[in-house]
Amino acid sequence: MSETILSMRNLVKRYRMGDEWQTVLRGIDLDVEKGEFVAVLGPSGSGKSTLMNIIGCLDTPTEGSYTLHGRDVGGLDESELALVRSKEIGFIFQSFQLLSRQNALQNVELPLIYSGTGQRERTERARLMLERVGLSDKMRHYPNQLSGGQQQRVAIARALANNPTILLADEPTGALDQQTGRQVMNLFHDLNEEGNTIIMITHDISIARHAKRIVRLLDGELSEGVAEDA
Ligand SMILES: Nc1ncnc2c1ncn2[C@@H]1O[C@H](COP(=O)(O)OP(=O)(O)O)[C@@H](O)[C@H]1O
Ligand SMILES: [Mg+2]
């Protein structure tokens, strides 16, 4: 049985620039079911980061509704959003965003500290996640002692640590060479097969094609699928 975990209806985002309002997202309708692997594909300036920030509860829509895991998150305040974020979303960024003075294990433990998990369980869970991404032999390495691909795998382990509802990735292969990028996509594929829901933002169609479903963002409007010749 399918379960809708993300639902947007006529979602609009405007930014105010001085006296002018710029409409960046123009009535987005989007449903994502549990277990999907969706790519949001769009060129630079199409509104991808704006949409990602809203999906990830880093920002709120100007109009329309956003329901995440059964909860209307459109009107939440900062601290409520932060709670939802740490519980529901595992972020993966282009630039990995690891803490340079913490080793791999400590980086993966970080979200578990925020969620109030005790020390023993935290370490156990972080170890497990690092094993899952194939880094059991690198747990005490610092980011600068790891390759780009390995750093991204640490970041993926960190994103998985709290067992989030959605893995939300922003250009996850943008800083990696092609072969390493493919390895990361293979890992995404396996994580999706294991039941993780993944939303991946990208401007690169060859990366988007790794997802099971592609939605296209163009000038703040979303459409399903992509032309075969694209
Ligand atoms: N905080 C902001 N204030 C004003 N305009 C913004 C802000 N963030 C983004 N924009 C505008 O929204 C449009 C889409 O930006 P963005 O979501 O970053 O697109 P993408 O990630 O696809 O490149 C751009 O025209 C950008 O200038
Ligand atoms: Mg962007």
Image (cartoon, grey):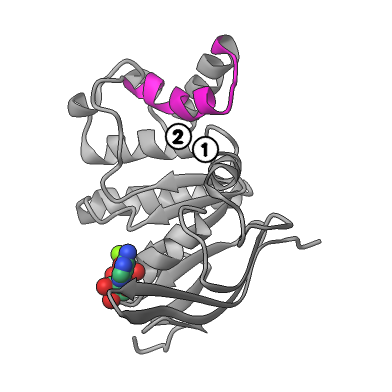
Q: Quadrant of residue 162?
A: top right
Real-space Cα separation, disc 1 to disc 2, in angstroms: 5 Å
Q: Is residue 228 above or below residue 45?
A: below
Residue 160 tag number: 1
Helix, strand or loop at mark 1: helix
The foreground one among 20 and 97 is 20
Q: Would you call the spot at circle 1 few (<14 residues within 10 Å), some (14-19), or many (20 or more)? A: many
The residue at the point 26 percent across, 46 percent down is: 95
Q: Quadrant of residue 72?
A: bottom right
Q: Which residues are magenta?
A: 103-119
Q: Which sits in the foreground, 12 or 31? A: 12
Residue to which mark 2 is pinned: 157
Against 97, residue 39 (above or below) is below
Q: Position of residue 43 (x, y in %)?
A: 29, 77
Residue 106 is one of the magenta-drawn residues: yes
Residue at image coords 29%, 52%: 181
Q: Is residue 10 above or below residue 104?
A: below
User: Quadrant for ligand 2?
Assistant: bottom left
| Residue 169 image point, x, y percent | 42, 54
Give the quarter of the figure containing the N terminus. Answer: bottom right
Viewport quadrant of the C terminus: bottom left
